[in-house]
Every structure is written in C-alpha cells, then in structure tokens.
Amino acid sequence: MSSNTATDNAVPFTLPDLGNEHVPRVVAERLREHGVVLLDGLHGRGEVRVAAELLMDPVVRHRDSGPDGLTALRDLGASIAGRSTFAGLGRGALAPHTDCTQAQDPPRLLLLACQREGTAGGSSVLVDGWRVLGDVLRLESAALDALRAPRAAYFGGADGRFNPVLAPLADGRWHVRFREDALARFSPDVVPHLPALREALQRNAITVRLRPGQALLVDNHRVLHGRSAFTGERLMLRALGAAAGWLELEPGFAAPPFAA
C-alpha cells in the first residue's frame, strides 16, 4: 500500500463534489489499485449515510448498527468489559483484521468515518494483503500451502466456519481473511507459520490518524484494519456493504507480479 497516494491525499466526497465526474473515477481507481481510499467531507450521520449508499449496494446491517445501517463506534465502558465480540466498542487496541471473518462472504467494503477524535491514540492501522501475500510467497512453500488450505482457520464462535487465510480465486487472484483473537483458531499446519505471518503484518502496517470529517474506504477482502488504543470521547461511524457496480471491483486482488 503506497501511503502517499492511497492515504495521504484525501478525496473530497460530498454531494457537490460528486457532480465532478473526476471524483468518482479517482475513488474507483484508488480503491482498485491500493485497496483503500481516504475521503473527506463526511460530517454528520446523514452525510456518512449518503456516502455509504453511493459506495455500497446494498449497505449491510450489523448486529450493532442502527436502522440506517451505520454503527457508532465509541467506548461503552464497563457494559462490554470482558466481552471479546464487543472489543470494537471499547477503547483498547484492535489488531489488524477482516470484518465479519465468520461470514460465508464478508462484506466487500468498509467505510470508517471519523466524527470526533479522541484525546490521544485511536489511529487506524492498515495492512495491505497484497504485500502480505508477497512476503508469504518468499517463504518456504509449506507456509502458503498451510495458509491456503480450506481448513486453515476457524473464525467465530458457535456460528463460525473454517476458511483459508489466503484464499486463491480464479485468474490468479486472492482473498485475505484474518483475525487473531478469541474468535480465531488455527490448524496445526498453520501454527508454525504464525510468527512469520505476524512479522509480515507488522512490517506492512501503516497508521492513519483521521480528522473529523475524514473517512477510510477499505476493501475488506484485501486490506486488514485495526486501531491503536485511545483516550477521550472518540466517535467513528462504520458502514459495511457490497461494492456498488460503478466501482468495478473484481473479486479479490491480483497476486504480486513475481508470483505469476
């Protein structure tokens, strides 16, 4: 992921901006090339909802979302203490992960819009699966064989499922699905390769501190996302959904050139 083009230069994404045909084209191109786009101009729940409806078809309801499909991510304090499935509603750090890993087909897009910064911390952490795949391909073949196996990992609780961590798709494309917390268990073949995978995740992580009105549009099948711990009254709005047709996203992401 090239931070100077993908996350350093925000794309204005208000309704007036969308009247300029250049804006949707830039958003689509950056998303296809980098797996993430930094947007700007999303102040308030209404504007975030409008953006989500333009980018997603449809917006997918989540356990924690409101009737409009948006989830308010803020610290709920003692009410969620010790409940691992509610970690996103606390103030602790979140390791980079795929949203909805337990789903048969996790939502393709994640929109994460900052409405209020915390006092300290709370930066978003992004890891491009394209780069992680490149690192894995440089390891011994047993690593990739283990990570691509159909039962490489079990994600979720009683309603979870087995899936590859790096899933090969048609035409040499790939799909990453990963988390490492209480909702993840890995096969005996994968466990020896987890240290190298963790190193690849750390090596390829970038941090982005969103300002109020800024948002990250993330390809959830390619880019893992997390956050650093924070203090203060940080508030983010999140939307999940399928990609709108005008974004022209192919399934997964292409392998690095040397993998061909």
Image: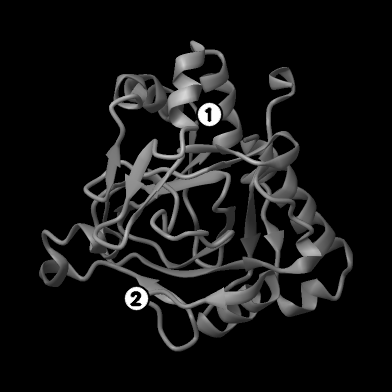
Residue depicted at 69% across the width and 20% down the height? 259
Q: Position of residue 94 (x, y in %)?
A: 31, 48
Q: Is residue 211 above or below residue 62?
A: above
Does the CB distance between marks 2 and 1 fall below 8 Å? no
Q: Which numbered circle lies on residue 110?
A: none
Amino acid bearing label 1: Val
Using the rendered image of the protein, determine whether residue 98 is visible from the camera's viewpoint: yes
Circle 2 sits on which residue? 64
Which mark identifies residue 132? 1
The residue lying at 72 percent from left, 17 percent from top is 258
Q: CA distance from mark 2 to mark 1?
A: 30 Å
Image quadrant where one finds the N terminus: top right
Tally the marks. 2
Looking at the image, which residue is at 39% across and 19% down?
A: 196
Determine the secondary structure under disc 2.
Answer: loop
Relative side of 186 to 32, left or right: left
